[in-house]
């Protein structure tokens, strides 16, 4: 083939979403299933560990906080690494890191050792998501980007649900240590396999002329006629130069950066209020562990359905209308739940229905925020931009350990859901402030 100059962004953005590209999004989503699985392992194993070690739940509060702190660190560092050394390399390294740390948890014998290992695992868990979001965004045409990113990130609650199901079988048979070994070995083996079959982002490769033959081969697999001798035009955002965290605070991006930080912080606060304290609310009200488990499960599964629906709506109608509308609806649902009676004598069905709807809306907003962030930031700083936004959002998850008990002690479920609604009001206002929303189709 004769030598030609190829505009990779235009080629991909205007091309078809081929079966091979869908396969790559599936592989990316698979990595996040393991992220969600390992992230939830401590929560499902904690009651068993408490009994075995004769330690109260309060003693594990620092362990949980250290895990979230690790995720904050990982989101920032691995996002920056993804822009410098490649999204694929950073993602697989994060998988290996949280896999090794999770296996090591099986050998821990003290709360302090468990906290250190969860800090290390958190770095890998937090670093995987921004790189997965960047990869999913950069494998596909522009019009499919929101849906592709959403399909990847929605696997967090899916992985968490699988962790709960695995615990039902594993804890009685192999114990909590065996469960952690399973949760660690599987992502390590998968990362090794993906190192052979998962390619780097084409939008990252175009910035590195020494890898253009690799880029040409990848584009052919995606259905584009590109010869090995082709040269590639540098992206329009190449003026940003080498990736730098300071670039996310540039004049064009500053407002969106701070708005995304506020949105991630407040929405993750609302999400983790549900993850962390819904079982305690339901069991404390006398509804039993079965209802508590069902409540948390449908909160997660409602999020899976809501997030996929949100991704499709974002592709068609743009992100501003969809995300602000869903966040506003989540505020209303949280306020409705604050007025519901949650006691031993309450009807369970209305509570579960509202938890499903509320969980669906909150998780839909939180998941599609990754797609919004991937759209806001240009290729050169995409992983850094997404990573720092998610890292700042993890502070909201850390706050849950203190804000949740305070709300429950104040006026029970009423003040708990008021707190959730307040956080979602901030999310709504922050999303409305973002300027570079995904446009309608």
Image (tube, rainbow, N blue to C red):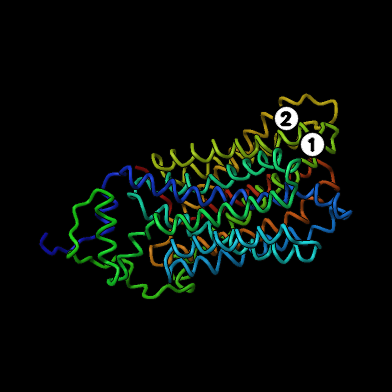
Residue 190 percent coordinates (x, y): 51, 53
Question: Outermost residue toward the front?
Answer: 173
Give the x, y percent position of residue 310. Answer: 49, 40
Query: Local crowd at mark 1 within 10 Å, few (<14), some, or many (≥20)?
Result: many
Residue named by callout 1: 282
Q: Quadrant of residue 400?
A: bottom right
> In this rendering, would 70 be left or right of 138?
right
Q: Is residue 402 above or below residue 206?
A: above
Residue 238 falls in which quadrant of the image? bottom left
What residue appears at the point 40 percent right and 55 percent down from the top-left corner? Answer: 198
Q: Is residue 43 left or right of residue 75?
A: right
Residue 173 seen in the figure: yes
Please state which of residues 204 and 37 is positioned toward the viewer in this rendering.
Answer: 37
Task: Determine which residue is flagged by label 2.
Answer: 351
Mark 1 secondary-structure assignment: helix
Q: For this view, does 160 lie left or right of residue 144?
A: right
Q: How many marks?
A: 2
Q: Position of residue 95 (x, y in %)?
A: 54, 59
CB under 8 Å between discs 2 and 1: yes
- Residue drawn 53% across the image and 59% down it: 128
């Amino acid at each position: 083939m004769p030598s030609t100059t190829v505009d990779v962004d235009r080629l991909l953005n205007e091309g078809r979403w081929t079966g091979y590209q869908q396969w790559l999004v599936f592989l990316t989503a698979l990595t996040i299933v393991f992220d969600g699985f390992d992230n939830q392992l401590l929560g499902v194993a904690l009651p068993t560990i408490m009994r075995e070690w004769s330690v109260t739940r309060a003693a594990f509060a620092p362990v949980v906080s250290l895990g979230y702190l690790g995720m904050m660190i990982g989101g920032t560092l691995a996002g920056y690494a993804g822009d410098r050394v490649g999204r694929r390399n950073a993602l697989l390294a994060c998988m290996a890191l949280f896999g090794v740390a999770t296996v090591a948890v099986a050998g821990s014998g003290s709360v302090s050792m468990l906290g250190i290992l969860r800090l290390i695992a958190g770095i890998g868990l937090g670093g995987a998501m921004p790189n997965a979001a960047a990869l999913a965004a950069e494998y596909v045409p522009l019009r499919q980007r929101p849906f592709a990113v959403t399909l990847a990130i929605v696997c967090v609650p899916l992985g968490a649900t699988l962790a709960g199901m695995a615990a039902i079988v594993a804890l009685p048979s192999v114990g909590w240590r065996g469960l952690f070994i399973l949760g660690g070995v599987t992502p390590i083996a998968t990362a090794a396999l993906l190192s052979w079959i998962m390619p780097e982002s084409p939008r990252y490769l175009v910035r590195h002329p020494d890898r253009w033959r690799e880029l040409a081969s990848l584009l052919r697999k995606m259905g584009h006629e590109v010869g090995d001798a082709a040269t590639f035009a540098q992206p329009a955002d190449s003026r940003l130069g080498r990736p730098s965290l300071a670039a996310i605070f540039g004049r064009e991006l500053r407002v969106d950066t701070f708005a995304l930080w506020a949105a991630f912080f407040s929405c993750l606060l609302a999400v983790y209020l549900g993850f962390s304290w819904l079982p305690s609310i339901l069991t404390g009200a006398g509804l039993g562990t079965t209802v508590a488990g069902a409540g948390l499960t449908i909160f997660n599964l409602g999020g899976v359905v809501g997030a996929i629906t949100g991704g499709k709506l974002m592709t068609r109608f743009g992100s501003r209308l969809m995300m602000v509308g869903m966040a506003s609806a989540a505020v209303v649902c949280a306020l409705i739940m604050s007025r519901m009676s949650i006691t031993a004598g309450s009807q369970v069905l209305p509570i579960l229905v509202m938890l499903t709807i509320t969980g669906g809306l909150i998780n839909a907003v939180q998941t599609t925020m990754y797609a919004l962030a991937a759209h806001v930031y240009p290729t050169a700083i995409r992983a850094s931009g997404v990573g720092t936004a998610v890292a700042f959002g993890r502070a909201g998850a850390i706050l849950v350990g203190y804000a949740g008990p305070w709300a429950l002690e104040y006026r029970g479920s009423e003040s708990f859901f008021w707190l959730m609604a307040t956080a979602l009001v901030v999310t709504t206002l922050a999303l409305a402030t973002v300027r570079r929303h995904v446009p309608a189709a």
